Amino acid sequence: MTEALYRTDPYLRDCEARVTGLTETGALIVDRSVFYPAGGGQPGDSGRLEWDGGALEITDTVKAGDALALACDPAASGPATGQTVRMVLDWERRHLHMRVHTALHLLSVVLPLPVTGGSIGAGKGRLDFDMPEAPGDKDALEAALNELIARDLPVTEDWITEAELAASPGLVKTLSVAPPKGQGRVRLIRIGTGAGQVDLQPCGGTHVARTAEIGRVALGKIEKKGRQNRRVTLLLV
């Protein structure tokens, strides 16, 4: 099992880790990681490994059972199993993912409809909604979203049991992606506190600490993707 340092501190940019094995494709399995693995619409992190006598660019991070694997050029010379390495995160790319991810949670607040899909990129993201009719005033939606961001609300996490989640199905906004489960408990991301809380939903991804860190956003096209499905694009500006 890989210790998920990115979950306890999404702002951690480097760490020491030990290579514990290889996957069939040559990806490096590590015992701890600041790199987030692809999942829930958020891309896997990239960065660099450094060790005595060598260095290697990491192009992606993926799940390998209960461990994490770091994808790299299979032709490159990598560290040996058991080797201690320094993981250095591509922070600028990750931080863009964090800003977009939190902004998409807020988009689901100003558009309170079931979410049928989503994707996060470096500076751009989108959510698909069960939305039979397009919203009448996109500018008003964008203004409401930026007002929430500007309130500088805290973004925190809580944990509940899987049984508690099953008893509160309204917490789940996504129709196509199930909350990360299987360990007996589920992580919730909360935006705002007390009477000022605006959102609470299951999520395993990385987020900024406060909404003002997102910066201003713009809404792009609202595209029809099916009889009742519409895609809303969001961009950092």
Image: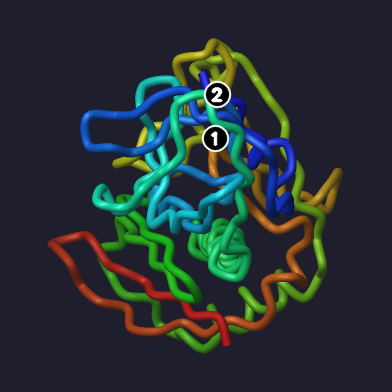
Is residue 164 shown above or below 39? above
- SS label for mark 1: helix
Task: Confirm or deny contact between disc 2 and disc 1 (CB under 8 A).
Answer: yes
Q: Nearer the viewer, residue 165 or 234?
A: 234
Residue lying at 53% horizontally and 56% vertically, measured from the top left? 48
Q: Quadrant of residue 152?
A: bottom right
Q: Rate crowding at label 2 as few (under 14), some (14 to 19) or many (20 or more) other CA atoms within 10 Å.
A: few
Q: Which amino acid does label 2 sit on?
A: Ser
Q: Nearer the viewer, residue 56 or 227?
A: 56
Quadrant assignment for the C terminus: bottom right
Residue 32 placed where, x, y %? Answer: 60, 30
Q: Which amino acid does label 1 sit on?
A: Leu
Toward the left, the furthest residue is 227
Residue lying at 13% horizontally and 62% vertically, measured from the top left? 227
Is residue 117 shown above or below 96? above
Left or right: 167 as drawn, with respect to 119: right
Left or right: 37 as drawn, with respect to 197: left
Q: What residue sits right under mark 2 in the picture?
A: 168
Is residue 100 shown above or below 114? below
- SS label for mark 2: loop
Residue 212 placed where, x, y %? Answer: 77, 71
Res. 171 mark: 1
Residue 3 placed where, x, y %? Answer: 61, 26
Residue lying at 47% horizontally and 57% vertically, measured from the top left? 46
The colour style of the image is rainbow
Marks 2 and 1, how far apart in space?
6 Å
Toward the front, the furthest residue is 53
Q: Rate crowding at label 1 as few (under 14), some (14 to 19) or many (20 or more) other CA atoms within 10 Å.
A: some
Kindly tell me whether residue 109 is visible in this rendering.
no
